[in-house]
Image (cartoon, rainbow, N blue to C red):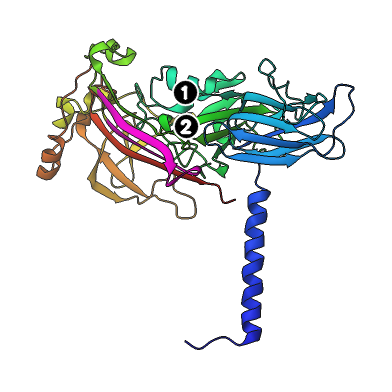
Amino acid sequence: MKSLPPSRRKVFRSLFLFGLILFANQLGARAQVDTASLTGLVADANGAVVAGARVVALNQETNISAETVAGEDGYYTFTNLRPAVYIITVEQAGFKREVRPDMRLSVGQRARLDFTVTVGQVTETVTVTAESLQLQREEASLGNVVDNRRITTLPLLQRSWDDLLPQVAGTQGDPYTEQAGGTASGRTGGVNIHGVRSLMNNFILDGQDNNSISTNVQELSTQVSRPSVDAIGEFKVITSQYSADTGRAAGGVISVTTKSGTNEFHGILYEYHRNKVFDANDFFSNRLGRSRPQRIQNQFGGNIGGPLFVRDRAFFFADYEGTRIRQGVLRIATVPLAIEKAGNFSANLGNEILVGGQRVPILNPNGTPSGQFVRQGQLFDPRTQVANPLFNASQAASAFNPRFIRQPFAGNIITNIDPVAARLSALYPSPTLTGRSNNFARTPSLSDDQERFTTRIDYKIS
């Protein structure tokens, strides 16, 4: 292959370096929507700041650590820490090392943890176990975190993690489900926050935009990707006062983070089964005297996570869930009566039609009044349609100025029904309910099969 001239190679090298720098900046400037941050002040017993103190945050599950140094003002800051339990260590020459274990950081949290170090040798260690993270003072947003313990232990009617959204103050569930509703068959992700419609919420999954482009939820969900409840690590619902890195919608912000692997292998296998044996009959079926509709729901799957190749550096997580739903749903429609199939619509005739306070006359084919007036439900024979000799072309066609006239069926009974039409009308089922409208009820079975896969790899480059 012919090599590029030096000037061209220099251009391509510059473009490559520019793209690499841009990519690195994007990683560093990533919005803190699926991670957490930690800041605090390092001071001595007299309240004087300790500049240059080395602060280390160690993830207890992966042994991956982050390190920073307190500035001249004594403050340290960690950004983009994975939601997990950490050991925070502070050390500085001339002071004892101070350790704070079991510090849990949640998704989207801006936590503060101050340290008061004591004079001594750095080889001496002071472990503080009673103090927890201070009240959040770094931002004014209001919301709540639903942790993994609640996600995995609370009963979920539809086995969907967003059934837990109404646990947060200011939210109202709006599940958009079909009759009885299943995980796959019902619309999900709908929740009104402080009265704002669900389509105005901002859904974020692992830091990425997860909002369906919809105006009336044609996609059956306000989210693009809906991971299994067993793949969710935790999620945070911000109901108001959100910061610039998360705000973009009039509703709330729902930031979801999926599970990741650790240094230990963990996995589950499960089978969820539900049928109509213990279900009560729904209101509408019970009112019509119909038995409980069919209901069989099976959800099965599992996940596994752990170290990938080497510990303390690379981790994987994989989740699969299958859904099989056979759901009977009550449907009410209108079918013709037996006499109507035979062409007898005499019972449909109603009062005379009034237009502008005047009765609408029926004309003879020669344009003279027949002495009859159009009634509600009146049927006209299309085979008798002729041009109206009295039609005034200079005026728009109307009930008093028709372009064509037809003769009504005598007694509103159709005669000489076409054989093809008769065979088609015979296909209509017989009514199951009384009345001429909404007189047919059925319970068809809806099939809903779905497969969900979630995979994730976490790797610490350096």
Element under disc 1:
helix
433 on left or right of 264: left
What residue is shown with label 2?
A: 232
What secondary structure prevails in the magenta region?
Answer: strand
Q: Position of residue 267 (x, y in %)?
A: 37, 31
Q: Position of residue 279 (x, y in %)?
A: 28, 13
What residue is shown with label 1?
A: 151
Residue in front for this viewpoint, 423 or 204: 204
Q: Is residue 189 visible?
A: no
| Magenta part of the chain | 296-324
Query: Which image quarter: residue 446?
Result: top left
- Magenta residue check for 317: yes
Amino acid type indicated by mark 1: Ile
Q: Residues within 10 Å of mark 2 (few under 14, many from 20)?
A: many
Amino acid type indicated by mark 2: Ile
Query: Which image quarter: residue 155?
Result: top left
